[in-house]
Amino acid sequence: MLTGDVEVRPKILLAEDHLAFRSLLAEQLRAEGYDVIEVSDQDGLFSEIARATSDEDNPRAPDLIMADLRLPAEVGFEALARLRAVDRRTPFVLLTSFGDDRTRRLAMELGADAVVDKPTSLLALIALVKRLVPVVLV
């Protein structure tokens, strides 16, 4: 994306409590042209969502949110519901090791754009992000 003559990289809010996976995914997203805001727990996730939705023109607002279902409690659903209460546009990807039919159905009813089972292919996850929020190269 461009603002005047300055290239603006799409922002991804990544909420994942497993450090190794979060670091690897964030590193790959950055290499693909994204800025990544990393949080490791529900406090960080809820704080970033509140900050992003408090002002529609917030330059720190993420272009996509990717959150683990359990951080360590089942807060992914709560975060999705909070976001969708005020923002229907920002894509939300729910990551889960518990991808049963009930989880998928509830996530879609709450407005998730995708539910991704862990473990997952890093390449497939990056491809999903690129479909939801493409990087514009200038």
Image (tube, rainbow, N blue to C red):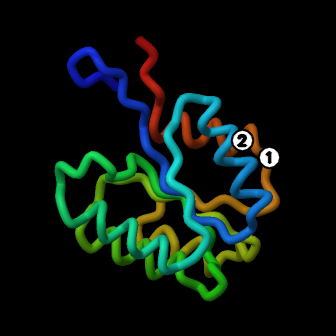
Placement of the C terminus among the 4 image quadrants: top left
Q: Is residue 113 visible?
A: no
Placement of the N terminus among the 4 image quadrants: top left
Q: On screen, 32 above or below 119?
A: above
Going by the numbered disc 2, the residue's amino acid type is Ala
Q: Are marks 2 and 1 in contact (CB under 8 Å)?
A: yes
Q: Residue at x 76, y 44 (%)?
A: 122
**How far from the left and from the top, in percent, is residue 18?**
74, 67
Q: Residue at x 27, y 74 (%)?
A: 85
Numbered label attached to residue 124: 2
Nearest the camera: 37 or 117? 37
Q: Residues within 10 Å of mark 1 (few under 14, many from 20)?
A: few
Q: Residues within 10 Å of mark 2 (few under 14, many from 20)?
A: few
Going by the numbered disc 1, the residue's amino acid type is Ser
Locate residue 74: give its quadrant.
bottom right
Q: Secondary structure at mark 2?
A: helix
Residue 116 as seen in the image, left or right of residue 65? right
Q: Going by the picture, which residue comes out furthest to the top?
A: 138
Locate residue 98: give its quadrant.
bottom right
**How far from the left and from the top, in percent, is residue 64?**
44, 50
What is the count of numbered marks? 2
Q: Secondary structure at mark 1?
A: loop
Numbered label attached to residue 121: 1
Nearest the camera: 116 or 75? 75
